[in-house]
Every structure is written in C-alpha cells, then in structure tokens.
Image (tube, helix red, strand yellow):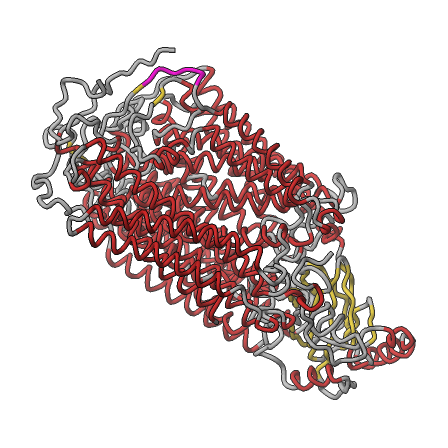
C-alpha cells in the first residue's frame, strides 16, 4: 500500500493566518486549563457533598463509629508528596519565567517522582485500612476518596511527564540550550502548556489539602 | 516534503516541521489497513474476555461472590477492558502514548475515501457524520424498546412479557434514550457546524472531539450489554436501594453512565474552548449565530454537570463491587445521597437536551421567515439564563421524597423562575414570525412543531413545579408525558429540523421533499396522539413503569399504544427518505438550497477539509434577511487579517 | 393579507390577534372553570384533594390563555404570513424587524410577574394545606393543630383517638416489596392490610419502607409520600367525604411494582371506631408478637426492627469488634 501525500491544494497559508491559528491555539490551552479546573471542582465537590451529607444524616449512628480514621501516617505522606509535586511545579515555573529552564526541569522530575510515589502509597494504603469498606459512612466515602485521589495524582503525573518529555524533545529538535524560549510555535505552545499545568497543580494542592483535612484531620 | 514549495515559511522553525495546529492537513489514500472500526471491535472483544477472566481470577474467592453466584467484579472488569480495548483498537490512545515520549501532534494522517468514516478521524465534519449514524442507532434501539412497552400496555390483564422482562425493557428504553438525547444535537450538528459558523478551519481539540464519539459508541455497547447480564430493574433514575439489590446488569447501567459522562465532558470541553478561541476575526459575541450561543450554554452544562454523574456512578459501582455503603441507609450511607447526586446532574442534563433544540429553531426560523431573529440579544440571554438557573432547581424532582421540607418553597420559586428565560425563546420565535413571509419547507415545519410541542411540555412543567399539584402528578403518566413532550417534542423534532436543513450541506444531496412532508405530518400527528392522552391517564391515577392499570383506563392506553405504533412507523418514512435521497437515487444539491445567509452556507459543497480557503473576516451577523442588498456577512478574500498583528516581542509573552 | 408597513395594516394584525385571543381565552377559561374544574382529579375527598384541585384549576386557567395565545399565533402565521412567490425568497420587515424594545420589556415584565405570583400562590397553598398531602420527611414543618402531640404520644404508646374529639389520627404505612400494610398506634398498634379511615379527621400518615424505596400514593386522598427504609416520611390530610379510594405505589420498586396497589375506605367516625376496636381485639394475640410500634423497622445500630429486641439498651455495634480487621466470612 503506497501512501500518496497530496498537497492540501487551495488552502491559504499566509503568515497572518498562521499567527491567528497560533494565537487561537494558545488561547485554547489557557481556556481549556481553566475549564478543566472548573470541571474537576465539581467532581471534588460531589465527594465533599457526600462526606458532609452522610455526616449530618448519621443514619443508623453509623457515620463514624468510634471516630474511626484511616491510617494517618499514610495520609500525611500522600498529602505531603502531592503538595511537593505541586510546589515543585510552581517553584519550577517561577524559575522558568526568569529564564532558568534547567531548574524547572529538575523541579519537574522531582515532582513527578513525588507524584508516582504518592500513587504507590495510596494503592498500598488499601491493605492497611483497619475497617471494612461498608462498615460506616466514613469508610465508604474514604474508599471513594482514594479512587478520586488516585485519578487526580495520575492526571498530575501524566501531565508532568508529558510536559517534561516535550521539553526534552523540543531541545533535541530545535537545538540549543534555550529551545523552550524560542519563538517557534511549538515552543510557544509548550510554554502555554506549562502555564496551564502549573495552574492546575495549584488547584490540586488546594483540593488535596481540603480532602486531607476532611478525611484525616476532622 | 511536507510543505509544498510554493508556500513561504516565514517562521523560525530551523527546518523543523511546523506543528499540526498551523500546518496544512495531509491527505492519504484510503486502505483497509490501519486502525478502524474492525480493529476496535476485535480489540474490544479481546478486552472483554481478558477483563472477565481477570475478574473471575481475582474475585471469585470472596465469600459474598461465591455465595451469590454473581461476580459483579468480573462484569465490571469485562466492561472496563472492553472499552479500553475498543479505544486502543480505534487508535484513540495512540497520541496520548506518543505524548509520553514527548512527541507533538504532527505527521498524523488524514484519510480520504469512505473508510475515513470508520476511523478515528480528526476532521470535525467526519465526526459529525459519525455521530449522525451513532445517534440514529441509539434512537432506533430505544424506539424498538418503546414499541415493546406500548405493546405490553395494550391490556391490563393480558401480559405479553413477564414482569421481570418488562421492567428491564422499561429501564433500558429510558436509559438508552437519555444517553442518546444528551448528545443528539451537540454531537452531530454541533461538531459539524460550530467551526463553520464561527469561521474556523478546525476545532481546538480535534482528538478530544473524536474521542467523545468513540466513547459515546462504547457507551452504547456497555448499556446494551445490560440486556445480556439480566438487565437492571431501576428505570433510568437508578434509585438506591433497588440499585443495590439488583444483579450484575446494574453494573452496565452505572458504568455506562460513567462512560457517557466522560464523552459528554469531552464534547462540551472541546466545543466551549473552540467557540471561545477560534472565532474568526470580526466575530464579536454579538455576531455569533444563535445556534452557537446555544451550544456554548450547553457546553457549560455538559462540562460542569457530568462530573457529578461520574462521581455518582463511581460510588454506585463501589457499592456493588467493593461493598461500600454509600447508598445503603442501614450502614451509614443514604439513599437520598444517590437521589441528590443524580438529580443535581439530572436537571442540567435535561437542559443539555433542551438548549440545542432552541438553538436550531432560532437558526432555522429566520431563513424561512426571511426576517432577522427578533430580539437576538434576548435569545442569547435566555440561553445563558436557562443554563445558569438549571443548577438551582434539582430538588423539584424530590418534592415528595421525604427530604427536608424547608427548601421546598425555594425550589418551587427557582423552578418557576426558569420558565422566564425559557419563555424568551417563544418571544423570539413569535417576533420572528410576525408578518414574515414564511416558506413551508420541511425544516420550517419541524421548527413550528417544536414551538407547539414545547409549549405543551413547558406548560405541563409549570404544573409539576407547583408543590401541591406535584402531589397529584408526580410519579405518574403526567410527568411522563411532560418530559416526552419537552425532550421528544422539543429536542427530537428540532434534531430532525436540523437534519433536513443541513443534510444537503453535509452530504451534497437533497432530501426528498415529499417523503419529508409525509414524515413530518405522520410524526407530528401521531406524536401528539400518543402523548397527549397520557396527561389524562396520569391525572386519572396511573403510575409510571407499571404493567397493569385500572380497567377503565384501557381505552386511553390503547389509543396511546396504537398511535405509538404509527409514530414508530413514521420513522420508517424517514429511513426510506435517507436511503432514497442519499444512496439509491441521489440528487445533487446546490451549495445553498435554502438561500441562507449563514456562514456555513458560504462554503462549497462538499466542504473542503480545511473549511475556508482563507480565514474569513466577519463584518456582521448572519440575520440580515430584512434588508435587500444587505451588507456582506464576511470578507473571504482581499483582507485576510485585521491590521495590528505584530508578533509578540518578549520571549515569555505567551504566558497568560 | 399583505404586510405593508403603513400604520393601518400593521396594527390590524396585532390587534386582530389580541381580540381573538381575549375572546377565546375568556370563553375557554369559563368553560373550564365551571364545567371541568369541579371534576378535576383527584376530587374532593380530603382537604388536600380539594386544595390541590383548586391549585390545578388556577394554574390551568392562567396557563390556558398562554397555550391559546401561542398556538393562535402559530396558526395565524401559518395562514396569513406566507411567502407569495414560492421559490424566490423576499426580504421582509426592514430595519424594524430586529426587535421592539416595548414588546421585549413588556414580555419580560409580564412573564416575570405571572411566574412570581404563581410561585407565591403555590407557597401559600402549601402552607395553608399543611403540606398539601405531600411527604415532609421525619420533621414536618406544616402540620394540623395537635399533630405533634398525637405523633409523640403514638410513639410512646399512649396515643388515643375517639370520635368527635378532633384528635389527629396517626396511621403508619409500611411499604415492602410488594404490598402496603398499615398500623394504628392509637389502637394498640395492630397491623392490617386494609386502610380504613374516619371521616372529618386529620390524618397523619407515617410512611416507611422495609426494603427499597416505594411511594404511598392514596389517589383520592391526595397523599403522596415516598417510603424510604430507615426514614419516617410524614404527610397530612383531612378527610371530608365518605367513599372508597385506591392506593398505588408510585415509585419503581422492582418486579411487581405495577401490582402493588390496594383499596381503602373512608367511613363515618363511629363506624371507624367500631372497626378499629374490633380488629384490635381480634388481632391482640398477633399484635403481641409484632415488633413494638416504631417509626422504622429496618435493622440499624439500635438493633433490629426498631428496638424489637426487648432490651432497648443496645449500643451502636462496632464492626471492628465483630469482624476484626478482616472481611466477614
């Protein structure tokens, strides 16, 4: 089977049009990142609603008998690692904006490692839970929280990893130490992606803190 | 090699290919190799087997599974791996994996020829056509189930189905229809026409858009699989604890809704971002077509309400597999939790269904009335108002449920208030028709039917929103008729209006007018004959989802059933029209058969893959029907861009 | 019927439509109110039925002109505002076709006022009818006089009801898959499959379920309350006519949901007392074996069947103590 590549004959491709498309694309990354935060807020809010609703109903006096709590050591560890990942991204971006992309990359890899470790710990915690999943309302919402937390950290890890990989490939393709700062459209798109990702990780930091407080501190 | 020599490249690219989002689309000849529907089916099937085996391997040792003889975990894993296999098979996960290696989106092939409709295609027009087929498959499946329901209800004492089978049919009908209806306009017509209407050459996230279609079709497979797992007995509302009591078929429902919610989020996300960012130069918000306004309002609901459904479905799945107690009152959970989560999603869901219908009607009416859309700003404000208010009314589904009565007056007020922005649509329609010169083409007839049907549906909603009257009408055939009038009478009629209107542009072939008229009149008459008696049946005391009823209601039920059969038959006329006009004896359609001023009609037929040769500069809105010699809608040639487009100066200026 | 823009022609259309609309609306409203209204379901057997019937009629009388108006507009448009030349589209309306501030503002004001008034009227009816027969959950906020005392006494086992005393009669409705049964706490708490009620009495229905969600819909009594396990859903009404009524389940509860119905009767107060005391005596042996009267009967942390175990001093059980840290086998 031969592949015949034809020109898209007839489509105009002037610099102004390229500029327009580039600006639209960058804008999409900005809007998309914020919209994604909005969507994720509703997911987290559903979990929080379930927690507080079951807490106030206390059906059968089984919301949280004996004030049962999931293993707090794991909770602290997972929360700290998540905050580390988010913190690294925010710190890294600060350095990036000042022109120091090497710092950003190191921070990124540290953050990714933290996220992966948090993922592992969250799964491992399932073995250490001292209560049966259906034994109380707290237990049920906690299990739901672990699933949502896994999803969140997985998204964080994926976003970090793909951004870091893209940075590496940009350097290879565009060449030079400052490939990420060039005006090439790929580099511009990359910088917009870093910005959106950092925003999302900031949101994750806030949401994780609230969830941590709800399930481990309250 | 990728960019033809005649095009100048003034970008500082150091010899590297420009990224896909500003490169030309590359075209390839078609072939039967590569990833397509066939590979998706094979991989999905393999995934199913793998998941089922894995579930049995992992979970059959647990006592509660061994004792009950039903392995919900195997069912869940089978369905999850089936969907995963389906996505891998169609190629949806290729790019996400490539991203992990840092690869950017470029060098991906665009196929030509008929096989491109069976692939993971990034052209929004192809995705639109795929959705048309997908939506019609959903609709006809649900429709057959509806025929079965009405057959059972012909006689209160002679039963065609067992109670068990009947309840599964009812539940499956409702769920399939609701899943279909949430994408019936956004999917086919939204994806196809939004970029054309805003003067864009592509969507913001074409892969997310294609993903939404393939997840939507996977959702069909999952919900259909319920019939093979013994069905589910809860109706489309899935109330716990009946949900907890049910068998493995319930997993199909819960997981199916989770999958569909992901598809809805993807579709809404892509459309919202595209509309915000890809509007052509000159298209200010006051020049945006009303259909696009309705889509962006719908996208707001799709993106924000669906995560709640995802959470609700996730908790239900946990209850049934891992034995948590989210919805089990006796163990610290609450059946009200499901009700609240479900209806918090459920109410925006029905506005996800209503708003695109309003948009279509607003778009079509000016063309056939030859007048601009009356009070355009109020129409747009109405869309936004409905979208906003729809988050504040959900407890009107729960007035008699025993939840705290304090909030009842509040929710009665908000529900009544939402009829104000809904009424704006009627103001706009009536104003547009005032002293117009109406041409009675088939799309226009469907639009007028939408107004009539939604009027009845909407007014019956006012009765339901009033708490005292709600005691009479909740849970019976009155509310059933209300939502069939609004969703089927409003949305589905609008969908057909949009199809008849836009198919000549999508396929380049005219739809047969005579068959279209037959389809319209039979559908309209029999729809009303089917569902109007149901208001009376409901007032006379027949509950929903029952297989037997008071003997004195048999005449009305029979009248409704026979009309329903004829309504079902009317869709055969539509199928005949499609077959005849598109395949058997097609007639070419001119590029703008309705003489519309819309931007989407200013393209050639068939629309080239890049939509517009040059990015148009928009000069005005598309509703200048009332002035002969009206200003041109857009400038397609000389002036490509507005002035003032100097490239950004600082290196980090793209941070926003 | 042309659409010239001269002043005379323009007012003609609109005025014509309005006159027809007013005439049709008045006629249809009057016809409805006097001919159909008194017979609107669910009738007038109870205070909530009568109140909800009135509510329905008012809504209908206000809604009918809207229905007539819009349909008339559509039909008028269909007949009068057609394109002459079928194939060539003509432009219509000129610059004034874009909008009309006066029309828009009036529409917004009128619809808003009507809608808010309807909502207000609904709230008034809801309060005036003590919940209008709808289930208010375990802590009702709209209730007839004496209801709270009657309910408290019922739970304590000290409630009484006698004819001509204007007491509130508590009746418990127990829903299960797939039948309703009824308990009368003021008559020793006997359980019956029949629902007999006294006339001219305020009834407090306490609806609960033993398994899944059902819904107690006493059609002619105009009472609808969902039955939830472990919840007590209270609904009130006042009987005012004798006669039969039907009870149907109106929330899908499984296979035989469609067959979950029974009949009941409203009888005179004397006849009711006779029936209740006779049945109480006849069932005394059975009633001793039933769980003590409680609002709910599902096993929970307080024991099974609402305190069925004679020792009412059950503490919330701890799954860890019973099951340890492993799954139960």
Q: Nearer the viewer, residue B475 or A218?
A: A218
In percent of width and height, residue B207 lies at 36, 35
Left or right: B130 in relation to C269 = left
- The total of numbered circles placed on residues is 0
Q: Within the image, what quadrant is residue A188 found in?
A: top left
Left or right: C56 in relation to B98 = right
Relative to B627, residue B313 above or below: below
Say if residue C82 shows up in the picture: yes
Q: Within the image, what quadrant is residue A163 found in?
A: top left
Residue A217, magenta (yes or no): no
Say if residue B559 shows up in the picture: no
Left or right: B72 in relation to A183 = right
User: What residue is rendered at 55% in x and 57% in y?
Assistant: A143
User: What residue is rendered at 32% in x and 47% in y?
Assistant: A109
Q: Within the image, what quadrant is residue A201 found in?
A: bottom left
Image quadrant holding the N terminus of chain C, namely top left
Residue furthest top as drawn: A1
User: What residue is rendered at 53% in x and 28% in y?
Assistant: B43
Image quadrant holding the C terminus of chain C, namely bottom right
Q: Nearer the viewer, residue B373 or B377?
A: B377
In percent of width and height, residue A32 lies at 31, 47
Relative to A40, residue C54 above or below: below
In percent of width and height, residue B151 lies at 69, 39
In percent of width and height, residue C199 lies at 75, 77
* Residue bounds of the magenta highlight: B28-33
The overriding secondary structure of the stretch rendered in magenta is: loop
Q: Nearer the viewer, residue B607 or C4?
A: B607
């Amino acid at each position: 089977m031969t592949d015949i590549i034809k020109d898209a004959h007839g489509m105009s491709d002037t610099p102004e049009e390229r500029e327009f498309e580039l600006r639209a694309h960058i804008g999409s990354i900005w809007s998309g990142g914020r919209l994604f935060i909005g969507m994720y807020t509703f997911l987290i809010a559903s979990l929080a609603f379930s927690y507080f609703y079951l807490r106030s109903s206390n059906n059968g006096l089984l919301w949280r008998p004996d004030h049962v709590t999931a293993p707090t050591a794991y909770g602290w560890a997972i929360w700290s690692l998540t905050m580390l990942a988010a913190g690294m991204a925010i710190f890294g971006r600060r350095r990036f904006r000042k022109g120091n992309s090497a710092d950003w990359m190191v921070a990124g890899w540290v953050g990714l490692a933290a996220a992966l470790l948090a993922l592992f710990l969250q799964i491992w915690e399932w073995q250490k839970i001292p209560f049966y999943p259906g034994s109380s309302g707290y237990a049920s919402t906690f299990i739901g929280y672990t699933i949502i937390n896994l999803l969140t950290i997985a998204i964080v890890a994926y976003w970090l990893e793909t951004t870091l990989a893209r940075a590496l490939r940009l350097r290879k393709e565009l060449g030079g130490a400052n490939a990420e700062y060039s005006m090439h459209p790929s580099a511009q798109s990359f910088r917009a992606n870093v910005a959106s990702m950092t925003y999302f990780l900031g949101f994750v930091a806030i949401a994780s803190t609230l969830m941590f407080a709800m399930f481990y501190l309250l | 090699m990728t960019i033809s020599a005649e095009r100048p490249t003034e970008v500082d690219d150091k010899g590297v290919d420009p990224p896909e989002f500003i490169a030309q689309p590359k075209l390839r000849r078609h072939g039967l190799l590569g990833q397509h529907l066939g590979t998706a089916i094979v991989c999905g099937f393999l995934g199913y087997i793998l998941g089922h085996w894995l579930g049995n391997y992992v979970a059959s040792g647990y006592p509660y599974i061994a004792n009950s003889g039903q392995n919900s975990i195997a069912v869940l894993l089978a369905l999850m791996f089936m969907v995963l296999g389906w996505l891998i098979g169609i190629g949806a996960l290729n790019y996400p994996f490539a991203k992990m290696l840092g690869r950017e989106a470029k060098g991906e092939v665009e196929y030509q020829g008929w096989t491109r409709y069976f692939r993971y295609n990034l052209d929004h027009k192809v995705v639109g056509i795929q959705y048309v087929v997908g939506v019609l498959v959903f609709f006809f499946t649900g429709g057959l189930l509806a025929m079965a329901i009405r057959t059972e209800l012909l006689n209160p004492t002679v039963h065609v189905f067992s109670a068990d089978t009947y309840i599964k049919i009812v539940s499956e009908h409702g769920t399939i229809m609701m899943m279909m209806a949430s994408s019936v306009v956004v999917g086919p017509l939204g994806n196809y026409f939004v970029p054309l209407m805003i003067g864009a050459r592509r969507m913001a996230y074409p892969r997310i858009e294609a993903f939404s279609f393939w997840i939507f079709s996977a959702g069909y497979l999952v919900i259909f699989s319920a019939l093979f797992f013994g069905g589910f007995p809860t109706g489309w509302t899935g109330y716990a604890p009946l949900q907890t009591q049910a068998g493995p078929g319930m997993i199909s429902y819960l997981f199916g809704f989770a999958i569909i919610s992901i598809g809805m989020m993807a579709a809404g996300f892509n459309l919202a971002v595209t509309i915000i960012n890809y509007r052509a130069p000159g298209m200010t918000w006051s020049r945006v077509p009303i259909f696009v306004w309705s889509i962006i309002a719908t996208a707001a609901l799709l993106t924000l309400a669906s995560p709640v459904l995802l959470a609700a479905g996730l908790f239900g799945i946990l209850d049934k597999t891992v034995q948590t107690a989210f919805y089990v009152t006796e163990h610290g959970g609450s059946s009200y939790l499901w009700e609240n989560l479900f209806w918090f999603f459920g109410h925006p869901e029905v506005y996800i269904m209503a708003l695109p219908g309003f948009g279509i009607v607003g778009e079509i009416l000016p063309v056939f009335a030859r007048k601009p859309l009356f009070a355009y700003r109020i129409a747009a404000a109405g869309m936004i108002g409905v979208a906003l208010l729809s988050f504040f009314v959900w407890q009107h589904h729960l007035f008699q449920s025993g939840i705290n009565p304090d909030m009842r007056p509040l929710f009665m007020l908000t529900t009544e208030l939402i009829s104000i922005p809904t009424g704006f649509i009627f103001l706009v329609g009536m104003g547009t028709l005032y002293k117009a010169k109406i041409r009675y083409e088939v799309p226009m007839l469907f639009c007028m039917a939408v107004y009539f049907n939604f009027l009845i549906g909407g007014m019956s909603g006012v009765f339901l929103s009033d708490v005292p009257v709600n005691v009479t009408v909740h849970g019976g055939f009155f509310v059933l008729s209300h939502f069939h009038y609004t969703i089927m009478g409003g949305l589905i009629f609008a969908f057909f209006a949009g199809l008849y209107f836009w198919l000549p542009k999508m396929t380049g072939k005219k739809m047969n007018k005579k068959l279209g008229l037959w389809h319209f009149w039979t559908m309209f008459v029999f729809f009303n004959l089917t569902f109007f008696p149901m208001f009376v049946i409901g007032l006379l005391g027949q509950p929903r989802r029952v297989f037997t009823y008071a003997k004195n209601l048999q005449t009305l039920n029979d009248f409704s059933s026979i009309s329903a059969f004829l309504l079902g038959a009317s869709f055969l006329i539509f199928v005949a029209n499609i077959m005849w006009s598109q395949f058997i004896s097609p007639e070419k359609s001119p590029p703008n058969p309705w003489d519309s001023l819309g931007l989407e009609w200013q393209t050639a037929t068939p629309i080239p893959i890049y939509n517009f040769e040059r990015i148009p500069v928009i000069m005005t809105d598309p509703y200048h029907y009332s002035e002969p010699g009206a200003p041109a809608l857009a400038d397609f040639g000389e002036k490509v861009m507005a002035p003032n487009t100097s490239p950004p100066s600082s290196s980090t200026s793209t941070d926003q | 019927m042309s659409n010239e823009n001269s002043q005379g022609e323009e007012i003609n259309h609109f005025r014509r439509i309005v006159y027809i609309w007013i005439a049709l609306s008045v006629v249809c409203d009057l016809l409805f109110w006097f001919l159909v209204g008194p017979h609107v379901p669910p009738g007038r057997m109870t205070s909530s039925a009568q109140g909800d019937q009135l509510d329905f009629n008012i809504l209908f009388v206000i809604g009918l002109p809207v229905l007539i108006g819009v349909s008339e507009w559509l039909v008028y448009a269909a007949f009068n505002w057609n394109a002459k030349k079928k194939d060539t589209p003509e432009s219509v309306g000129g610059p004034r076709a874009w909008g009309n501030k006066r029309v828009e503002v009036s529409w917004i004001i009128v619809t808003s006022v009507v809608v808010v008034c309807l909502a207000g009227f609904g709230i008034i009816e809801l309060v005036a009818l003590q919940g209008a027969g709808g289930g208010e959950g375990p802590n009702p906020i709209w209730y007839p006089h004496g209801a709270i005392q009657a309910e408290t006494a019922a739970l304590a086992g000290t409630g009484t009801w006698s004819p001509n005393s204007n007491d509130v009669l508590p009746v418990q409705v127990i829903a299960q898959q797939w039948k309703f049964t009824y308990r009368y706490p003021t008559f020793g708490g006997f359980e019956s499959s029949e629902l007999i009620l006294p006339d001219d009495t305020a009834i407090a229905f306490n609806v609960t379920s033993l398994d899944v969600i059902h819904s107690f819909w006493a059609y002619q009594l105009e009472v609808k309350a969902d039955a939830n396990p472990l919840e007590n859903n209270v609904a009130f009404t006042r009987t005012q006519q004798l006669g039969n009524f039907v009870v149907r389940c109106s929330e899908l509860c499984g296979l035989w949901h469609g067959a979950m119905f029974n009949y009941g009767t409203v009888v005179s107060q004397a006849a009711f007392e006779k029936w209740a005391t006779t049945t109480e005596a006849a069932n005394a042996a059975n009633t001793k074996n039933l769980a003590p009267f409680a609002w709910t009967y599902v096993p929970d942390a307080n024991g099974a069947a609402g305190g069925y175990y004679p020792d009412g001093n059950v503490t919330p059980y701890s799954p860890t103590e019973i099951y340890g840290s492993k799954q139960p086998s």
